[in-house]
Amino acid sequence: MEFFGDLHNYETHEQLKKEVENDLSDAIQHGILVSILARRLAIELDKSREFCNDMAVAGLLHDIGKLKLSKYLYWRREDALDDEEMKYVRMHPTLSYEVLRSNGYSKRILDAIYYHHENFDGSGYPKNIKEYSIPEGARILRVCDVFAALISNRSYRSAFDVDTDKFAEAFKFEMTEEEMRRLFETLTSTTVENAD
C-alpha cells in the first residue's frame, strides 16, 4: 500500500481509484491542449512541417514522467504542493526524457521535453539554463504549458480569465508588446477553435 502513500485520507479504495482516474484524465486533457497549442504556435512561427509535428508529439507527452511520481502525490489533493512534494514534481522532465529516450524519440522532442520548465531568466529547472540556451522547442512548450495551466481549473485555484490584467502579468516573458499580442491571438484563437 505504500505505493499510494497515506491511505488514511481515503474512505475506500474506490475513492482512490476514482482519484487516479481523474488525475489521468486531467493529464491527458492537459497533454492534448499543450499539443494543439504547441503545434499551432510552431505553425505561426513558420516552422517546418516536421518541427510542427514534433511539437505536437512533445506537447502530448511532456508530462509523462509524472506517472512515475504518482505514488508521492495521490495522498494529497486539495492544496498547492509543499517544498518536499515540489522536489519530486521537479523530477518529471528528467523522468519524461528517460521514458521517451528509451522508446526512440527524436533529439528535438527529447530536448523540448527535458527543458520545458526552464525560464528565459534562468530560474527554471532542471538545469537553470537561460535565454537562447534553452532549445526552441522547449521555449514553445514552456509558453504553451503555462498558458494551458493558467486557463485550466486546479484543485487549489480557478482558471484565469485571459482578459484580466492578472493573467497578462502571470504570463509575461521576455517579449515585446507585438510578440505578446501575436502570441495571445494565436493561443486564444486555438483554444476557442478547439472548444467547439
Image (cartoon, rainbow, N blue to C red):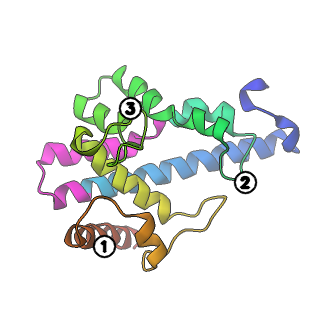
Queried whether the magenta region covers residue 49, the answer comes back as yes
Q: Callout 2: helix, strand or loop?
A: loop
Does residue 46 appear left or right of residue 52 in this picture?
left
| Image location of residue 143, percent across then percent down | 35, 55
What residue did someone put label 3 on? 127
Q: Residues within 10 Å of mark 2 (few under 14, many from 20)?
A: few
Q: Which residues are magenta?
A: 40-64
What residue did someone put label 2 on? 78
Q: Report the front residue among 8 and 181.
A: 181
Please tell me whether the stretch drawn in magenta is mainly helix, strand or loop.
helix
Q: Nearer the viewer, mark 3 or mark 1?
A: 3
| Image location of residue 161, percent across then percent down | 49, 75
Task: Say which amino acid is labelled 1.
Answer: Ser
Between disc 2 and disc 1, whose residue precedes?
2
Q: Callout 3: helix, strand or loop?
A: loop
Disc sitting over residue 189 in the figure:
1
At 33% from the left and 56% from the top, the residue drawn is 36
